[in-house]
Amino acid sequence: MNQITVKRTAIEGLIVIEPTVHRDARGFFTEFYNERDFEEAGIRTHFVQDNVSRSVRGVLRGLHFQKHFPQAKLVRASRGRVFDVAVDLRKGSETFGKWHGEILSEDNFRQLYIPEGFAHGYLVLSPEAEFCYKVNDFYHPGDEGGIAFNDPEIGIAWPELTGEYPGEPLASAYRMTDGTPLIMSLKDEKHPLLKDSWIFE
C-alpha cells in the first residue's frame, strides 16, 4: 500500500508529497522516504546524501542552483516552519522563470520534490527551524550559482516579509512583519537577477 499522497504543481516535475502519518497516544510514526512508493509515484531518483541546516526566524537562504552538476532535491522541515521556493531554470521549459512556494513544517509533514534544473531557497517563519534535504549528487566545489531572492521579474511573494526592492538583494532593505531583521549570507546578497545570471552566458 502506497504511503504517500502526491500533488503535481503547475510546474512540470515539481511535486508536493505528503506521507501517511500514523498517530496514537504515544505520538506518531511516518515514513518520509520509501523508494518503492516514490517510484510508483513516478519519482525515480537515486539519492546519495542527506543534509540538515538549522536557522532562526528571518533567515533566508537562496536562491541557489548548481551550474554543471544540477541536483534533484527532496526537502522538508523536521522542526519549525519555512516557506520553501523553487524557480524553474530549465532552458526551453514552458515555465522557465516561474516559481512555486510551499509552507513546509513539522506539523504538516509536507515535502517538496525538486528535480534538476531549479533554483531553490527558503525563508524561516518560526523562531527556529531545522531543514532537511536529500540530494542525488555530491557537492562539487565551485559549481554554485545563485539568483537574487527579490528579483522583480520572478516576483516571489515571500510571506511575512516587508520591504521595497532597492535594486539589489540586500537583507537590510527588508524585515519580517514582527520587526525581525532579514538575515542572509554576504554571498546571497550578491546574487544577480535572472536576466544577468550565468544561465544566459
Image: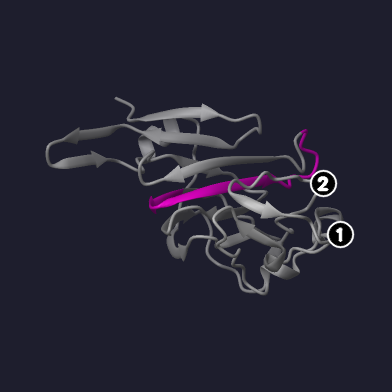
Q: Position of residue 19 (x, y in %)?
A: 36, 35
Q: Decide: is 133 above or below 105.
A: below
Q: Amino acid at mark 2?
A: Glu
- 174 on left or right of 131: right
Q: Is residue 90 magenta?
A: yes
Give the residue at x 59% y 60%: 60
- 188 on left or right of 14: right
Q: Is residue 69 something that shows in the picture?
A: no
Q: Which residue is mark 2?
A: 153
* Range covered by the magenta-colored residues: 76-94
Q: Is residue 152 something that shows in the picture?
A: yes
Give the residue at x 30% y 41%: 31
Instruction: Between residue 61 and residue 138, name the one nearer to us.
Output: 61
Q: Which residue is mark 1?
A: 196
Q: Secondary structure at mark 2?
A: loop
**C-alpha distance separating marks 1 and 2:** 12 Å
Quadrant that contains the N terminus:
top left
Most extreme residue toward the left is 25
Q: Amino acid at mark 1?
A: Asp
Circle nearer the viewer, 1 or 2: 2
